[in-house]
Every structure is written in C-alpha cells, then in structure tokens.
Image (spheres, rainbow, N blue to C red):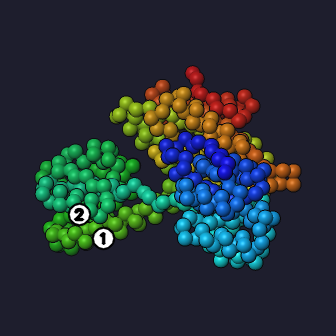
C-alpha cells in the first residue's frame, strides 16, 4: 500500500481526511493522489479489494475512490462490483471513476453503493467538491445572542434557556456598556428590555442603528408592555420583533431561532460571492476593518494578502468563460482547504482575492501563501488537446501593525502584488516602504 501526502496548513491530523484510492494503474494513481493532495486530503493507494479490506481494518478512511477500468483488467465485472458491495456496511462513501460514462456503468456503480461517479479525465474541482460534500461534518459556530436586561435573575434565565438551545448567550445588565460589548462580542441578535433605568431600550436602539456594522442586526424587544400601539411605536424605532413578558422558554427559543435562520439566509446572499461562496468585495472590506480594530484592542498581528490569477484573460479567451469559472472555483476551494477556519477569504473582484491571516507575522504569512502558491501551480484543472491546463497566481502581502490603517493595508498589499506581477508572476512579494 503506497502512501502519498501533502500536508495541509490546517491543524487537522492528515488521517482525519484520509482517502483510499483503489487502482492497479500506478502512474494514474500517483497523479490523482497528488491532485487530491493539493486540496488537503491524505491519500493511500491500494491495488485491489483485498488490500482495501486490510487497509480499512487498520484505519477507517473518510472516503473510498475506485478506479473501475484499472480493476476491470484484473477481475470479471461480476466479481468487481460484487466485491465492492461488501464495503457498503462500513458507511464509508464510495466514489467511482470510469472511462465509460454510460448508463450501464453508472447503474452498476450505484447498485454497488456508489455516492458519486466521475468520467475520465476527472475534473479535479468537481471531485473535491463532491468529496467535501460526502465527507465533511456540517458544523458551524453557535449563534451569538446578547441579552440586555437590567434585572439579573431574568437576564440569567434567558441566558440559560438560550445556552441550552445551543446558542452562545452573553448578558449585559448595565445599558451604558452595551455598545462596548457589542463591538467585543459582535452578536448575531440582541434581546433587549424596553424599559430600563437611565437608558431605555428605545433610545439605545437608535444609537445602535447609527453604527454601520449594526444596521442589519436583529433586535428583539422584551417587555411587559401589552399596549399594541406602544409596541409598534417601539418597533418603528428600529426593533424587529416584540416579546411580551412573561415569555415561555419554547417561545423565546422559537422566535430567536427563526430570526437568526432568516438572517443567515439573507446574509448568505448579501455577503457571499455567488460563484465561489467566498466573501464579496464589500464584506471583505468590512471584515478587514473589523479585524484591524480587533488587533488594536488585543495588540495582535494581521497579514493581508492580495492574490491575482496570472494571465487570467488568456484562460477565458482561449478556453472560454466556463474554464475561467472553473479556475476561480479551484483557487477558492484550495484557499478554503489550506487555510485555517479563523482566516478570512474574499473574492475581491474578478480574478483578485483577499486573504486575512490572523495572528501571524510576515514570515509566517509568506510561508503559508507560498505553500498555497506552489499547490495551485501544480493543479491540473482539466484536459485540453495539448495537455492539461495549469495556472498560477501572484501575491502581495502587507502586515499590521507595520501599517495600521485598513485602507492603506489594502493599498500596500496591492502595490506588492503589482511588484510580484512585474517580477515575472507566480511570486509572493512583501510590501516595503
């Protein structure tokens, strides 16, 4: 059994993303293993189904990829697909590759338990997309809810109810500290008592709505006020919903979750690029401002990397816009796979991307981005009459606190990017004064 690995920048252990590739075609196996490895997976090549059985007994993989035509040379059709069926009990996703993209072959693969089918030459981006879909555990950070309530026992009750529902709830009992806490906590939703001493909820909402970063955050009022007209008056000041005390725990959770799910859907359209799923230009700029402010408060470091795909217009002109889209998706997928979950990635415009590397210095930023540059340059996007298409990118990096203004950070990284292009492309360049 041959082991091939290209260690990702992510902190996961390699075998957490293990794929068994079953093929007797050694040359093709090594090629495909290297391509999959660029996207952060760890690949082990096994030559036959017996080898696969032994491998699974040693370590359960996240997926099994089977090269049908290579195995068909060694086994009868019945033995091959019959033998593959034995692995369905493992619950490991089975994926098939074949020279023959026809209904009969696809049916055999499905009946053998196949979850995905790829015709040669394999589109590596589509394979990785499907591999991610089948192997990823859907997890997301818990919703953050800020409870603004001057009565501590009631506030703690709300916090307990929301925490038990899987949310991250924080309590503020002093209205004067709300803005500071919102900047620190950056909640997804605010539960606010309407009537509080010193600063009422209605006035506090006006202040919150004056801040650009909190214009769209849902605010749900809490009050014993049962006068409908007064409720509507409070809502007109910037609230999104009104809950009358006393509030049942189930009702509180249902309203909060409903608002948060709706916000999540709307945000996905507002902040994400439709092709790549990355943050769009506006959201990338907002994220940079937010991270610079965080770095100022926490005395942390930040690296801003601006990437641009080299000679991208030639890709579109030569192979068509569909090929160009494939390259853009490939780079976005590679960035998401190779960077940490805490890092921020955006499509800044066209073929340009912004990456915010949190809490790293200049040397670390260079190592990270250069590793990704190398991997991307070796990805074979699809077959052409003259071979396979390979593309590179250039990158410029600027760092905080060397530059403290968000706009100047972006401009500095862009200048370094232009220098990388001028130096021959496919390079990483630091900004220098």
Q: Tell me if residue 97 comes above or below residue 228 in the rendering.
A: above
Q: Earlier in the sequence, mark 2 or mark 1?
A: 2
Q: Residue at x 57, y 43 (%)?
A: 8
Front-lying residue, 63 or 290: 63
Front-lying residue, 240 or 140: 140
Q: Secondary structure at mark 1?
A: helix
Horizontally, residue 25 falls left or right of residue 276, namely right
Where residue 180 appears, x then y in whole percent? 28, 43
Front-lying residue, 113 or 418: 113
Q: Residue at x 28, y 50 (%)?
A: 207
Horizontally, residue 246 falls left or right of residue 138, namely left
Q: Secondary structure at mark 2?
A: helix
Which quadrant of the figure contains the C terminus?
Answer: top right
Mark 1 sits on what residue?
Answer: 254
- The residue carrying pointer 2 sits among few (fewer than 14), some (14 to 19) or many (20 or more) residues within 10 Å by Cα, namely some
Where residue 432 appears, x then y in whole percent? 58, 23
Which label number is shown at residue 57?
A: none
Where residue 346 appears, x then y in whole percent? 55, 47
Residue 260, quarter of picture:
bottom left
Rounded to the nearest whole Å, what is the CA distance between mark 2 and mark 1?
A: 11 Å
Where residue 19 appears, x then y in whole percent? 61, 55
Q: Which residue is the extreme one toward the top?
A: 433
Which label number is shown at residue 161?
A: 2
Q: Tell me if residue 162 comes above or below residue 417 in the rendering.
A: below
- The residue carrying pointer 1 sits among few (fewer than 14), some (14 to 19) or many (20 or more) residues within 10 Å by Cα, namely few
Front-lying residue, 70 or 242: 70
């Amino acid at each position: 059994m041959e082991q091939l690995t290209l260690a990702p920048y992510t902190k996961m252990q390699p075998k957490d993303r293990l794929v068994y590739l079953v093929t007797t075609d050694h040359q093709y196996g090594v090629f495909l293993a290297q391509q999959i490895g660029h996207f952060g997976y760890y690949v082990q090549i096994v030559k036959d189904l017996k080898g696969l059985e032994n491998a699974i007994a040693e370590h359960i993989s996240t997926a099994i990829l089977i090269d049908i035509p290579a195995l068909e040379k060694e086994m009868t059709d019945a033995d091959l697909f019959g033998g593959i069926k034995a692995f369905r009990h493992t619950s490991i996703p089975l994926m098939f590759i074949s020279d023959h993209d026809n209904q009969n072959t696809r049916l055999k693969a499905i009946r053998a338990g196949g979850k995905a089918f790829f015709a040669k030459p394999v589109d590596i981006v589509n394979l990785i997309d499907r591999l991610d879909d089948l192997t990823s555990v859907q997890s997301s950070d818990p919703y953050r809810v800020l409870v603004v309530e001057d009565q501590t026992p009631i506030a703690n009750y709300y916090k307990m109810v929301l925490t038990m529902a899987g949310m991250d709830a924080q309590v503020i009992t002093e209205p004067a500290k709300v803005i500071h806490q919102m900047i620190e906590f950056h909640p997804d939703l605010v539960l606010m008592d309407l009537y509080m001493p010193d600063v009422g909820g209605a006035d506090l909402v006006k202040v919150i709505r004056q801040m650009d970063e909190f214009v769209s955050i849902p605010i749900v009022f809490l009050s014993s006020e049962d006068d409908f007209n007064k409720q509507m008056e409070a809502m007109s000041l910037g609230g999104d919903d009104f809950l009358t005390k006393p509030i049942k725990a189930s009702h509180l959770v249902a309203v909060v979750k409903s608002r948060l799910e709706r916000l999540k859907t709307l945000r996905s359209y507002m902040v994400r690029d439709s092709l790549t799923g990355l943050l769009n230009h506006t959201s990338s700029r907002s994220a940079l401002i937010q991270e610079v402010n965080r770095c100022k408060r926490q005395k942390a470091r930040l690296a801003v990397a601006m990437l641009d795909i080299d000679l991208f217009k030639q890709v579109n002109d030569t192979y068509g816009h569909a090929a160009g889209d494939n390259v853009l998706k490939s780079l976005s997928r590679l960035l998401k796979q190779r960077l940490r979950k805490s890092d921020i990635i955006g499509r800044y415009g066209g073929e340009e991307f912004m990456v915010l590397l949190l809490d790293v210095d200049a040397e670390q930023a260079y190592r990270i981005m250069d590793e990704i540059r190398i991997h991307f340059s070796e990805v074979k996007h699809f077959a052409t009459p003259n071979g396979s298409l390979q593309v590179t990118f250039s990158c410029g990096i600027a760092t905080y606190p060397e530059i403290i203004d968000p706009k100047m950070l972006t401009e500095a990284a862009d200048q370094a990017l232009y220098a990388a292009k001028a130096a021959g492309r496919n390079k990483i360049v630091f900004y220098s004064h």
